[in-house]
Image (cartoon, helix red, strand yellow):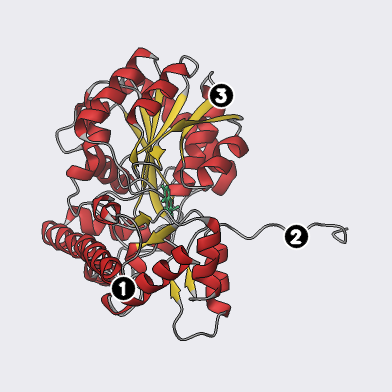
Amino acid sequence: IWQAIPQGPPDAILGISEAFKKDPSPKKINLGVGAYRTEEGKPLVLNVVKKAEQKIINDPNENKEYLGITGNPKFNALSAQLAFGEHSPVIREARNATVQCLSGTGSLRVGAEFLAQHYTVHTVLLPSPTWANHHKIFPLAGIKDVRTYRYYKPSTRGLDFEGMIEDLQRAPEGAIVLLHACAHNPTGVDLTPEQWRGILRTVQQKRMLPFFDSAYQGFASGDLERDATAIRLFADAGLELLLAQSYAKNMGLYGERVGALSVITKSADVTKRVESQLKQVIRPMFSNPPRHGAAIVVEVLSDPSLYAEWREELKGMAGRIMQMRQELFRALQQVGAPGSWNHILDQIGMFSFTGLTKEQVRVMTDKWHVYMTFDGRISMAGLSSSKCHYLAEAINDAMRS
Ligand code: PMP
């Protein structure tokens, strides 16, 4: 039956890790996948996560029964609070249908399937560029008309704010607009609060439906409140919107697949009906989500001392990334890499958009064993002080090849 099946293409990001594993060079560096590494290049399990796991294991009432279709109710309530804020009118008025899903990706997918079934406008606008998976998730879920809006301006290595507004204004009335809540992936370029207000006005004028993707709350700036500014601005303005949250980066729960989807409505009554329809999407897709990761999140978010410790650990991770930006910037200047490198300092979050071309990336990988995506993106979280100079040399060489 399968004799003639064609080979599928390697995943743009996960394929890089596979190639990295096969490379025997001791010099190799993996800056492809967005996963936090310690200064020693090791994956990190947060202390608060270890403590939460101990509490869960020692709890005599803990078991391995199925969760309900929408997951752990405490997890859902705490996740909504984390994103929208303790005093959010959305939460006070019970206007959020929040359901536990399989990390950020699963939350986006459930949200997109829900929209395909219950929202009339099947057009989604994605930023250009964006995380590659966005381009697949929406059409596969049934939102077939995928368009892009201008976001990154190569000439300034910053935001194309005018282009973004123009493209949103040209979009069909009511279109879905995907917005990265903070730490835009892959560019690391974010909007200022003033620019977010401009986008909010346009979204309101065009009656668009915002779908926030929040994969980096607290991880971008080290401050959970600050990284939720855009979400809260839109929610507090009374908009109906969707939000996909991931705990992969900010709690280091990558493989546990913990996330939440919230659909914000106009009333508690509508919320109940929306939730009943989200169940209809989830039940035949994965029936119910896994317990363990959500239980960890509940412990961390509900225990004041664990919560305080988590905030410190988050600051530690975000701080190390910012320090890597400084060190790489200095190393690039030392080796005399051509051009200005201020963007390395200005960009936010896990990634830097270096500006390297596809050909230059090939030199980085083939000659220098530096693994990164072909769009020139590097994960700052995968870098360490001891590797900054080597990386700067590789970039300098690739640019002059
Ligand atoms: N959205 C964006 C923008 C991301 O960068 C990521 C992680 N790379 C995700 C969503 C989802 O990741 P996960 O499914 O691991 O939570």
Please name the residue shown 36% across and 77% down the image: 390
Q: Is residue 6 left or right of residue 245?
A: right
Decide: marks 1, 3 in contact (CB < 8 A)? no
Mark 2 lies within 8 Å of ligand 1 (Cβ measured): no
Q: Secondary structure at mark 1?
A: helix
Amino acid type at mark 1:
Cys
Amino acid type at mark 3:
His
When the figure is inspected, residue 377 is found, relative to residue 98, above or below; the finding is below
The residue to which callout 2 is attached is 7
When the figure is inspected, residue 131 is found, relative to residue 299, above or below; the finding is above
Please name the residue shown 23% across and 44% down the image: 227
| x then y, percent, for residue 72 | 36, 49
When the figure is inspected, residue 166 is found, relative to residue 191, above or below; the finding is above
Mark 1 lies within 8 Å of ligand 1 (Cβ measured): no
Amino acid type at mark 2:
Gln
- Which quarter of the rendering shows the N terminus? bottom right
The residue to which callout 3 is attached is 122
Quarter residue 305 falls in? bottom left
From the viewer's perspective, is the residue at label 3 or at label 2 nearer?
2
Observer-nearest of 270 and 48: 48
Quarter residue 180 falls in? top left
Q: Secondary structure at mark 3?
A: loop
| x then y, percent, for residue 197 | 24, 25
Q: Secondary structure at mark 2?
A: loop
The residue to which callout 1 is attached is 388
